[in-house]
Image (tube, helix red, strand yellow):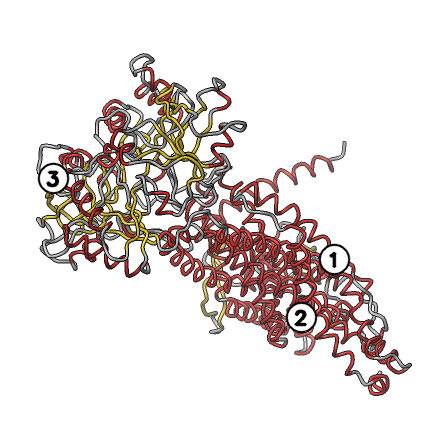
Amino acid sequence: MTVPILSAIVGVLRRIRLLATRDRSSADLESEMRLHLELRTARYREQGMSDRDARSTARKRFGNTLALQERSRDEWGFTWLEQFWQDVRYGARMLRRSLGFAVIAIGAVGIAVGVNAGFFTLVDTFAWQPLPVAHPDRLVQLTAVDARGVRPNQLTYTELTTIAAHSRTLEDVIGYAAEPLAVKATAALPARATSLGLVTGNYFAALGGSASAGRLLSPRDDRADAAPVVVISDAYWSGAFARAPDIVGHDVVVNGTHATIVGVAAENFVGVIPLVPDLWMTFEQGERVGATPGRLLDPKNRYITVDARLRRGFTMAQAASELSGIIAEPPGVIASPDSALRIVGAELRPRKSLMPPSARIFIVLAPALLLVALVLLIACSNLANLLLSRALVRQREIAVRLAMGASRNRLVRQLVTESVLIAAAGGLLGFALSAWTVEVVSRSYFRNFIPPSYGTLMLAMHPSWHVVAYTILLSAASALTFGLAPALHATSPNLTGMLKGDDVAAVGRVRRSRVRDSLIVAQVAGSVVLIAASAILVSGVQHIASAHSGLDPDRVSLASFGLAPVGRITPLLASERATFDARVAHAKGVASTARASSSPFSEWPRARIRSSDSNDAASTHALPINRVTPSYFDVVGQRIIAGRSFTAADSATNAPVTVVTQAAARTLWPHARAIGQTLRMLRANGETSAIVQVIGVAADAHSDMLWDDDATGYLYRPATDSDFATVDMPLLVRSTIPAPVLARTLRDLAIGIDRNTPLDVTALTTIHDQQVVPFRYAATITGSIAALGLGLAVIGLYGVVAFAVQQRRREIAVHVAIGAGPRAVLRLVMRREMRLVIVGLASGLVLALGESGLINSLTLPLPGLGIVGLAGVAALLLAVAAIAIVMPARAALRIAPMEVLRQE
Amino acid sequence: MTAERDPIPPGTLDMLVLRTLMAADGELHGFEIAEAIERRSRDVLQVEEGSLYPALQRMLVKGWIHGEWGRTAENRRARYYHITAHGRQQLAREIESYKRVSGAIARILQPA
C-alpha cells in the first residue's frame, strides 16, 4: 500500500529535480542527440558513403531534432508550467506597460479582499481559533437545565465539586468566576479596583499553565483552613510591582484580609476567557477572605463557569446524560417556592474556541457578511468592465495571434493569467491591509469598552492560516470572476474578424456590450445597498444617542466607594460608606445625593408583577426594577406626576410601597387611577412574594439600557438596610460644579475616610455614551465600507465613460462638424451611462427597502430609513455618479472635428 | 539495405530498451542502445533513432532507468544508462503482457 505512494513521491521529486535543472537538462539532451548523429554519420562513412551523404542520411534517419527535443521535454511533464511561466512574464510586461490600470486594478482588489479578510479574521478569532490552553479540542462547557427549561450558564460550587468527584466521562473539571475587587497590593499604595479570578485548584494544571516565578495554584490550595494564597498575572506583576524579583512571598490585602503571593503565571497564560485577571485565588480561600459573591455552599448561588475535558472514548451525549444524573435534583427535596428553578438536567457545549461555530452565530453575522461580500462583487464587476474595455483595444493583437495559430484555449489562459497576477498582487495587498486594520480597530474598540477592573484583554487577532487560505481563495475566485468573461469575450471568433488594418475606433459605432451594461447596473445597485446600510446604522445611532431619555443626566455623577462581592460587604465598609454619604451630602458644590441598586443607563433586573385585581397569568409583566433612596427622583431629574416619592420611614420599615412610571400605570390599570392600587410581586414559579401599594407615579424616562424595550414602564421600591448590607449601591450625586471638579472633591473625601477603599467616579453622561460605542463603531465601519464600495463604482463609471469618449471620437467629430452644440455632445456621450445609473439606482433602492427589515430582525431594533432617508441616498448617489460621468465626458467637448476626421 | 528492415512494433520500444540494458554487461549510451537492439534482432528491427530519446526521458522520469554521464572510448561526453530494480519489475510486467498478446495473435493466425 505504501509502495505506490512512495514511488509516486519519488517520481514527483525526480520531476522537480529535472525542473530545477531545466536548462542544463535541455543542454544535456541536445548534446546526447548530437553525439548520436555524429556517431551515426561516422558509421555511414565507414560504410563508404561520402561525407555529405553520410551526414544527410544520418539526419533523415534520426528525424527532426527540435521536435524530438520538444517531445522529450514533454515527458518531463511540465510543459504547462513553462507555458504558465511565459504567461506570467507576458502578463507582467503588459501590466507594467499600463501602469495606471495596474495600480487601479490591484488597489481595487486589495481593498475589497482586505475588507473581507479583515471581517473573516474576526470570525476566525472567535469561531475557530482554539482557546490558548492545552488540548482545547476535548474541552466542553457545562450548562444546567432547570424545570422551566432555562439553561443557566453558571453552576453552583456544590454542583461543580459533585461532578468533579463522580463523573466517569469527564476529567479536568475546572471552575472559573471573575470578580472585580478592591485589592491593596503594597503598603505604600492605596487599594485599587482589581480583577480577581476565582478558580478551582486544578485550573492551571488542567489548562497547561506554567509559572514564570514561584508556583501556580494546585488542588492543595482548595482548602479553606490553609493560609490564603494568590497567584498574580504577568501584567499585574508589571503594573503593581514593577516586576520586583522578590515578588514570591509578598503580602496583598484582598477585601481586608491578608493573602500571600506564591507565584506569577507565565505571560502567555490566558485561561478559559480572554480577559486575564490580575490575581487568581481558589474558591475555598476566596470565600474565607470575602472575595466570593455570597456563600460558597449556598445551593442558589449560581455564578461559576464550569469547563471540563471529555475523557477519551466518551461522547458528549454520554457525558450529558451522566451529568444529568449527577446534578438533577429529585422533586420535593427543594422547598416549593423555588421548584421552578429545580435543576432537571445538564448540557454540554464544545469549547474548542471562544464561540464554537453554530447556525445561530452565522445568522447573526449574515448581514455583515453580505455587506463585505458586496464590496468584493463591486470591485470584481468594476474590473471585469475595465478588462472588457482593454480587450477591445487589444483586439488587433489578439486577432493577429489567433491568425498565427495560437489556440483560443491558450489565449484565454494567457488573459486569465493576467487577471490572476492582478488578483495575486491585490490579495497580498488586501492581506496586509486587513492585518493592520483589524489590529488597530479592535485595539481601539476594546480599549474604549473594557474597564481595567475587568482584567487585561488577551485576544490574539493575528491572521491565522485560515485567513491566509481564505484570502487566497477569495483572490482566486475574484480573478476568475473578473477575468474569465472578458477573456472569453475578447477571443470570441466573431469579434476577431477585423484584421484589416482598421482601427477599432474606425469601425464606427462601437458595439455595446450587454455584459458591460449589466455590470455597471450591478455596481450602482450594490453601492446603493451599501450606502443605505450605513445610512440605516448612522441614523439609528444618532437616533439612540440623541433621544431624550426623560432624565436630566448633566451634572450627575455615579460614585462607587469600595468594591465588594454581593453579600460580602464588611461592617467596616458599610460604615465607611455611610460616613462617605454623609460627607458628600454636605460637600461644597453638591446639590443632592441618592443611592440606587442600579444606575440609570445600566442593565436593571426585571421584576415579575401582576395587578392585584387580576388573577390572569397572561397579565403578568416583567418590569425593570430599581431599589432607591427617597431623593433618587430629585437627583436624576425625574418628576413625580402624582402621589409622592418614598420617605425615610418607608426605607427604615421596608414599607410595602412602590412608585411606578406613567407607562407602568397605563399598562397595569389602563382605566383607573394608579395611586392606591396594589400589585403582586411574583416568584419565578408564579407564587406571590409580596403585595405592594402604589404611592406615586413618576414621569416616563428611559432609564435602563438604551436599546431595551421599556414600553411597559418601570418600577421602584424603597432601598432598605438589608440592601445596603448586601449589594454595592452606588451613590448618585447631583452637583452644581462640573463633573471633573466634583470627582476631585469626592476623591479627597474618600481618602480622608480610608485611603485603602478605592473610589470610582463616572459622569452619568459617560455611562450613557458608553452604550453608544459599539453602535458608533458599527456605523463607522459600515460607513467606510460603503465609501469604499461607492469609490470603486465611481472609478468604474469614470473609466467606462472615458473609454467610450475615446472610442467614439469620430462619431462625436461628425456631430460637431454638422453643428451640434456642447450640450448635445455631452448628451450624446452621457445618455447611455446615465440611464444605466438610474436603472441601477432603482434596483438598489428596492433591495435597500428589504435590507432595513433584515438589519432590524437580525441585529438591532433601529428605525428604518424612511422615504426621506432613501431620497437622500438616491440624491447622494446621483450626485456622485453625475460627477463620475461628466468629468470624463467633458473630454468630448475638446475634440477638434477637423483634426479627427482628417486623421481617420 | 534499409528496405529489408522492419520498424519496431508500436508500444514495444520501452520493453526492448529495458531488455537491452538488462542484457548489457555494463552501461550503454543512446547510440549503443540503438545499435544493440538492431544487432540482437539480427538486423531485422530498426530503431527509429530519434524516438529513442523521448522514450529514454520518459523512463528516466519513471525511474526505470538511471543515467550517468561518462566518457566514450573516443573521449566524448555521453550519458550511460543502466536499468534500475524498478525497471526490472516493469520489464517483467511488459514481457508478460507481450507474451500474452503475441500468443493470442499467433493462435488467431494459425491455420485452422
Disc assigned to residue A833: none
Q: Is residue A17 visible?
A: yes
Q: Nearer the viewer, residue A75 or A118?
A: A118
Classify the position of the N terminus of chain A by image quarter: top left
Residue at disc 1, secondary structure: helix
- Tell whether A586 sits left or right of A664: left
Image depth: mark 1 or mark 2 in front: 1
Crowding at label 2, few (<14), some or many (≥20) Cα neighbours within 10 Å?
Answer: some
- Tell whether A882 sits left or right of A340: right
Crowding at label 3, few (<14), some or many (≥20) Cα neighbours within 10 Å?
Answer: many
Q: Are marks 3 and 1 in contact (CB under 8 Å)?
A: no
Crowding at label 1, few (<14), some or many (≥20) Cα neighbours within 10 Å?
Answer: some
The chain containing the residue under callout 2 comes to A
- Earlier sequence position, callout 3 versus callout 1: 3
From the image, tell me which residue sits under label 2.
Answer: A59
Q: Position of residue A108 (x, y in %)?
A: 58, 65
Classify the position of the C terminus of chain A by image quarter: bottom right
Image depth: mark 3 or mark 2 in front: 3
Q: Are marks 3 and 2 in contact (CB under 8 Å)?
A: no
Residue at disc 2, secondary structure: helix
Three-letter amino acid code at disc 1? Ser
- Earlier sequence position, callout 1 versus callout 2: 2
Q: Are marks 3 and 1 on the same chain?
A: yes
Three-letter amino acid code at disc 3? Pro
Q: Residue furthest front?
A: A643
Q: Position of residue A667 (x, y in %)?
A: 51, 30
Rounded to the nearest angstrom, the CA distance separating label 3 from label 1 is: 73 Å
Q: Residue furthest top?
A: A332
- Tell whether A212 sits left or right of A355: left
From the image, tell me which residue sits under label 1.
Answer: A518
